Amino acid sequence: MLKVFWGAAGLLCLSPAALVPVANAASCPDLFAKGVPPAVLSETARIGTVMLCNDQYAVLASEQTRGPLWSAEDLTEENLEIADKMQRHDSFQPDTRLPSTMQALTADYTRSHYDRGHMTPSGDEAGATAQKQSFLLSNIVPQTPELNRGPWEGVESAVRGWAREEGEIFVVTGPGYDPDQFRTIGAHHIPVPTVTWKAVYDPAGNGTGAYVCLNTAQPSCRITSVAMLIRLVNIDPFPALPASMKDHVAAMPPIRESPYALAKQDRTRKLLKEWGKKAAQKALRALVKSLVP
């Protein structure tokens, strides 16, 4: 089981306007595959979490990480057409719907040498309000610049291409932590993920798959099954789907090279092969080992 440390607050579902305790995700089921939100499989890990429903994505925020455990969206071709015409205005802000003990601050990232990495990307968001919501720090985790501006941007681009091709896909994104390599930034000790991941369900193609990326100075990504992702991070992004669908990997788009990656071609030409390098294997083994009870 993934060893992340949690506080004692209860589970809530929040609307964008206020803190409103409810028993389920009834306020934003349209954002989830078959209307069911991602499941954190450890009861201990569910303690100290708050679900936030935004206009076009939802997150499960953690008391101890002061960031998301997952961020879920219903990504459509129609919304992407609108988002493509939007001009991005970077304006990261604390999520004031959360109590102060759960909020990350922009100062936590100052001089940290880590980027503020979107889980649900601003490039997916249609409209000024939705895009502004994507910059809330409840949707952000520390990512290395090499990952955030390189292969991670390529993963986001690949997923957008998939949505344009199929018309609609459900996407869940999140971090994974390795307690043996636990590192934090800022005064509030925001933990740095060992990996970040993005799971996709394609209703039209009736398939699933996941991208998993090492959050290092020499990042690499791989495509894997949702079943393997669940083993790694102890979160089921699509609990309403049959296990047989999560065991197999759909014909997923390859990870596209971003402009940043192309500028550093020598680092990114063989991203998938780099996953097999000794350092990457060591980090992955440590993560898998942390999942063993």
Image: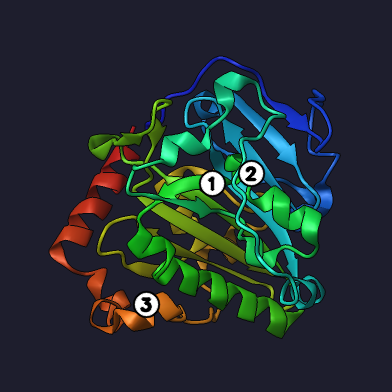
- Residue 103's disc is none
Q: Amino acid at mark 1?
A: Ile
Left or right of 40 in this view: 112: left
Q: Amino acid at mark 3?
A: Ala
Q: CA distance from mark 2 to mark 3?
A: 26 Å
Left or right of 57 in this view: 254: left
The residue where tag 3 is placed is 261
Place of residue 122 in the rendered image (x, y in percent of width and height, measured from the top left): 64, 61
What residue is at 31 percent from the left and 76 percent from the top?
Answer: 272
What secondary structure is marked by label 2? loop
The residue where tag 2 is placed is 136
Q: Residue furthest left?
A: 278
| Residue 34 seen in the figure | no
Place of residue 245 in the rendered image (x, y in percent of width and height, measured from the top left): 60, 65
Callout 3–callout 1 Cβ contact below 8 Å: no
| Residue 105 seen in the figure | yes
Left or right of 8 in this view: 125: right
Is 130 drawn above or below residue 146 in the view shown? above
Callout 1–callout 2 Cβ contact below 8 Å: yes
Crowd rating for badge 2 (residues with CA inside 10 Å; few <14, some 14–19, many 20+): many
Is 181 drawn above or below residue 169 in the view shown? above
Place of residue 286 in the rendered image (x, y in percent of width and height, measured from the top left): 24, 46
The residue where tag 1 is placed is 140
Q: CA distance from mark 3 to mark 1?
A: 21 Å
Left or right of 188 in this view: 162: right
Q: CA distance from mark 1 to mark 2?
A: 7 Å
